[in-house]
Amino acid sequence: MALEHRLKLFISENHRLVVGAFVVLGVLCLVGAGYVFSTPTTQTVTEETDQQAFSTQTYSSALVTRPSALYEQGERLENRSVYFLSASPSMTLDMTTSVPAGEPVQVAQRLELEVRGVRDGEPFYQSTRTIVDTDRTVEDGRAAASETLNVSALNQELAAIQQEVQSVGQFQLRLVMEATYRTESYEGTLRASAPFVIDEVAYYVDGSLVAEETESTPAQRQITQPPDPLEYGALGALGLLFFGAAAVVTRIENHVDPEELRTRIVHDQHAEWISRGEFPTNSEKQYISILTLEDLVDVAIDTNRRVIHDPQIDAYAVIDGSEIYYYALEDVEADEWLGI
């Protein structure tokens, strides 16, 4: 209750300032709501335009040219995880690059076989064999090239140089694919590589040879966003709330007695010194009026007595022998009741 009394007392003593502040805040909120409602915001966004996709990939296949228990002679094996030298001594590599159709695109394709001799991870020999090497302009969105690699002959070459090296090092093979494209708007290079493994009876590409890229051009544009109902609605509601608060403050100021509030505050502060009771009305007693309840509490503290609160007349008193020190908001009513 003490906080409520203090708040009411503050409003009573400063009601014009408080009402003015609430009114000003209410007007500002309503003006702000009107501004937000009538002023749409613009935002700059970046969009990717003129998107074009480019990709390249290499597929493997092998023709069964020798009788085999696994495959029929003349059968073509495509994109298998492994090929056998006894059945298919040669492998075909098909490289295809896809570009936007309907416009001239210059496409250069290159597929190489790298042979590296290494010892303890460090190279001591390297050679490159070009399998595919084309450069052309296409308009149908597709550039393709196909070449056959004699794996059996390659294996014999590797065996010969391995015989020369003995156990000092080993040879590693890798297929390296590269496609370069050039359009009116974009140019770039697609690259991929994968190990190529040949053992005693089989060979295979250890991975996929695929690369792709999407090109685009960033463009900025302005977009207008409509006002957010949550924003101007909240400001409008807040403005009305401030006007309502101003009305409440005015009502409180018209119905409160500042002196009574001060008395209530002191009552709450010194409640441990105040007890409920009735004053003696014996005419032999001497009644001494104290101007404020706080002064009366001081009297009680000085005389080591308690303050008696008589709620019937809303008065306070300290009884000290034949003397009664009292304080009441309504002095006339208290005097008449006490008969003085």
Image (spheres, helix red, strand yellow):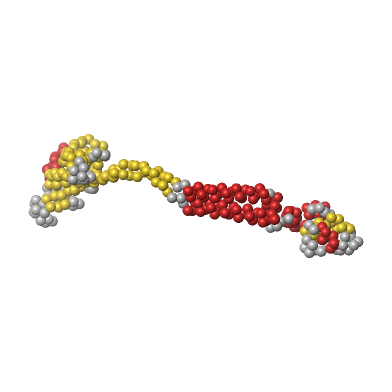
Q: Who's the residue at 61% across and 50% down the image? A: 22
The quadrant of the image that shows the N terminus is: bottom right
Q: Who's the residue at 29% across and 44% down the image? A: 50
Apparent side of residue 44 relative to residue 201 in the rendered image (left or right):
right
Examine the image and state in which quarter residue 264 appears: bottom right
- Between residues 4 and 76, which one lies in front from this camera angle? 4
Asked if one can make out residue 68 in the rendered structure from this viewpoint, the answer is no
Residue 204, image x, y percentages: 19, 48
Q: Which residue lies furthest to the right in this view?
A: 284
Residue 214, image x, y percentages: 28, 45
- Between residues 121 and 240, which one lies in front from this camera angle? 240
Q: Who's the residue at 23% across and 39% down the image? A: 182
Asked if one can make out residue 79 in the rendered structure from this viewpoint, the answer is yes
Examine the image and state in which quarter residue 215 appears: top left
Q: Who's the residue at 79% across and 59% down the image? A: 315
- Between residues 263 and 228, which one lies in front from this camera angle? 228
Residue 304, image x, y percentages: 82, 55
Apparent side of residue 138 relative to residue 65 in the rendered image (left or right):
right
- Between residues 334 and 88, which one lies in front from this camera angle? 334
Residue 254, image x, y percentages: 70, 56
Total labels: the figure holds: 0
The quadrant of the image that shows the C terminus is: bottom right
